[in-house]
Amino acid sequence: MKVVIVGGVAGGASCAARLRRLDEQAEIIMVERGLYVSYANCGLPYHVSGVIAKESSLLVGSEQMFRGVFAIDVRTKCEAIAISPKDKTVELHDTATGTVTTESYDKLVLAPGAASIRPPLPGIDLPGIFQVRTVPDARAIREWIERGTEFLAGMSNYSGIQFAKPTRHAVVIGGGFIGLETAENLVHAGFDVTLVEMLDQVLAPLDPELALMVQGRLELHGVHLALDDGVAGFKQQDGGELEVQTKSGKTYPADIVILALGVRPETALARTAGIEIGKRGGIRVDAQMRTSEPDIFAVGDAIEVKDFVTGEWSLVALAGPANRQGRIAADVIAGRNSEYRGTQGTSIIGLFGCAAAWTGVSEKTLTRIGDADFEKVYLFPNAHAGYYPGAKMLALKVLFRKSDGRLLGAQALGEDAPGVDKRISALAVAIQMGATVYDLEESELCYAPQFGSAKDAVNFAGMVAADVLRGDMPLAHWSDAKGQFLLDVRQPVELVVESVPGAVNIPLGQLRARLGELPRDREILVICRSAQRAYYGTRILLQNGFKARNLSGGMLTRVLASAA
Ligand SMILES: Cc1cc2nc3c(=O)[nH]c(=O)nc-3n(C[C@H](O)[C@H](O)[C@H](O)COP(=O)(O)OP(=O)(O)OC[C@H]3O[C@@H](n4cnc5c(N)ncnc54)[C@H](O)[C@@H]3O)c2cc1C
C-alpha cells in the first residue's frame, strides 16, 4: 500500500508515525511545503520573547528522525499542487528546484492546516507587519525586534545611571489565543502593547463575563485594549514607524504589528480534487476522516468537525484534535475501525501567570442556537486547600442540562494555572463521557492540601449543580434580581467594601433568630460574597417555609453580570 500524506506537522506527522507503527510494509511519503516537519507552532509566541530561547527547541521531530525511526520518505520544500482522484495521483512541486513530479497513491491524507487570515487592507505588506504561524515567521519577528533594540543593547553596557528608556510600541490585531499569547510575550520583550479586537471581548469562545476577567488581567499587566474596533489599514510614518488605523478612526503608533486575525482552512488542494467543502469552509469528512473521495482522508485545521455537544459543523484549530484525527486516519487506512468523537474545543491559555481554560459549549452558543434546556452555576473555590499556603481562588462556570443534569460546558480562570488546567481537563473528560453533574459529585479526585481539597472544585461544581436540580438550592442570577427582595447574609463589615442598594442585611449567624423580619409573601434572593453562606441561608429559609433562591456566585459575579 502506498500512502501519500500532505502536510508534515501536527495532523500529518502523527498520521505518518501511527501508520508506520501499524503497517511495517506500507510505503509512506510525507510532503511538507515548508522547511520543517513536526515543529511546535504552539511554542512560537514564546520564542518571540525568548522564553523559549532556542529555535531548535521548537523542532520536535526532524526529517532525519522520520526517515530513520519510521522509514518515512519525508520531502520538505515540496508542495502538493493538484490531485486527480480518478488516476489516484498527486502532483508534487519541489520548491527548491522547481521540478514537478507525479506521485501515485492508494490512499491520500490531506493535513495542510490553515492559513493566517490576511485581509487586503491598505498597507498590510509594509515592513514590520508580521504573523505568527511558522518557525520562519517567529525568526523574522525576533530579527525585527533585535534590530530595533540596538540602542537598548548598547545601554546595557552603559555604566552610568539610565533614566530614560525609549518606549517601543507593538499593536497586536486579534484577541484570540495566538493574539493574546503574542501580546503577553511582547510585554515581556519590553513593548507597550495595544490589542485591537473587532468583537467586544477577547477570546471569542468564552462567555463575556469570563472574558471580562481575562481583559482585567491583560490591563493589569499594561496591555491596552481596543475592543469593538476593527483594523482599517496601516501607514508608514516618515521616521519609518508604523501607524495602525482602525475603523472607528483611531490611530495607534507601532514599531511592530502582529496580525492574529484567525485562520482559514487550507482547502485549495482539496478543491482541485473536487472534494466536498462544508458550509463553514473546511473539508467535509466522516467520522473516519474520509472525505467525499473514499481514498482521500483529511485531518486537522483544514477540516470541519462536529461539535461534540451541539452536533453542529464547526471549525476548531487545535493541536490535540489534529493529532487525534491523524491517528484515526492512520487506523482506518490500516484497516481498523476507529472513529472520531467530535471536538469540544477544549483550550487553555496562560496569561501573565494566570490561566483561562474552557471546554464544551458556552452559554452564548446555547443562546444562539435557541437551546433553553440549560442552567449555569458560578463557583469561586480555592485551587487547593485554603489552610495550605498559597491557596488561590478559581473562577469556574459550569453549564449543564436542566432536564437530566448532563454536563455541557465549563470555563475557568485563575492564578493557579495548574489548578485551572486540572479542573477543565477533568470536566472535558466528563463531558466526553456523557457525565452528569451527579457524576461530578461522586468523582474521586486527587487530594493533598497543596493540590486540591477533599471536596475538589470539580466535586463542588457537581454538588452545587445537583443541589439546584434536586431543588435543594433554587438558583437565581443577577439578571433576576431587579425588584426582588434581597437578603444579604454577610457580616456588616463586608458591606463597607461593597453592598447592594436596597438589600436587607442579616448576618448568617443571626438569621434563625431574625426570621420574623423577613416577608413570607415574597420570594427572597439570598446574597453573600461567593454564594456559599447564601446557600446555608437559603436552606434555613426554605426549611422555615420561606420562598428563597440563592444568587449564583454572589457578589463575585455581580460585576461580571454587566458583561453577561
Ligand atoms: C502560534 C500558534 C500557537 C498555537 N498554540 C496552540 C496551543 O497552545 N494549543 C493548541 O491546541 N493549538 C495551538 N495552535 C494550533 C495548532 O498548532 C494547530 O491546530 C495544529 O498545528 C493543526 O495541525 P494541522 O496538521 O492541521 O496543521 P499544521 O500543523 O499547520 O500543519 C500543516 C502543514 O501543512 C503544510 N502544507 C499546507 N499545504 C501544503 C501543500 N499543498 N503541500 C505540502 N504541504 C502543505 C503547511 O506548510 C504546514 O506546515 C497554535 C497555532 C499557532 C500558529
Image (cartoon, rainbow, N blue to C red):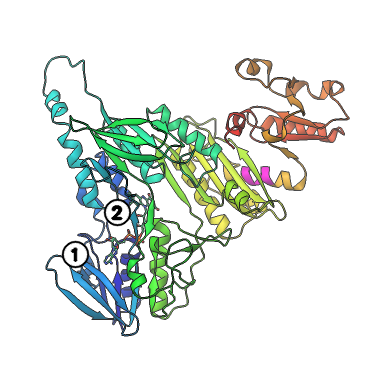
Quarter holding the C terminus? Answer: top right
For residue 161, side relative to residue 353 (left or right): left
Residue at horizontal 84%, vertical 30%? Answer: 522
Q: Which residues are magenta?
A: 460-465
Q: Which residue is mark 2?
A: 40
Q: Is residue 444 visible?
A: no
Residue 356, compared with residue 237, is above or below; it is below
Q: State the SS at label 2.
A: loop
Q: Is residue 316 visible?
A: yes
- Is residue 464 on the magenta stretch? yes
Amino acid of disc 2: Ala
Instruction: Report crowding for label 1: few under 14, some 14 to 19, many 20 or more residues within 10 A (C-alpha).
Output: some
Amino acid of disc 1: Lys
Residue 166, compared with residue 146, is above or below; it is above
Q: Are marks 1 and 2 in contact (CB under 8 Å)?
A: no
Ligand 1, by image quadrant, is: bottom left
For residue 201, side relative to residue 380 (left or right): left
For residue 108, side relative to residue 360 (left or right): left
Q: Which mark is residue 217?
A: none
Residue 340 image position (x, y, % from top left):
48, 68
Q: Which residue is mark 1?
A: 77
- Distance from disc 1 to disc 2, alpha carbons, whole Å, reads 18 Å
Q: State the SS at label 1.
A: loop
Residue at horizontal 26%, vertical 36%? Answer: 235
Residues 196 and 440: in front is: 196
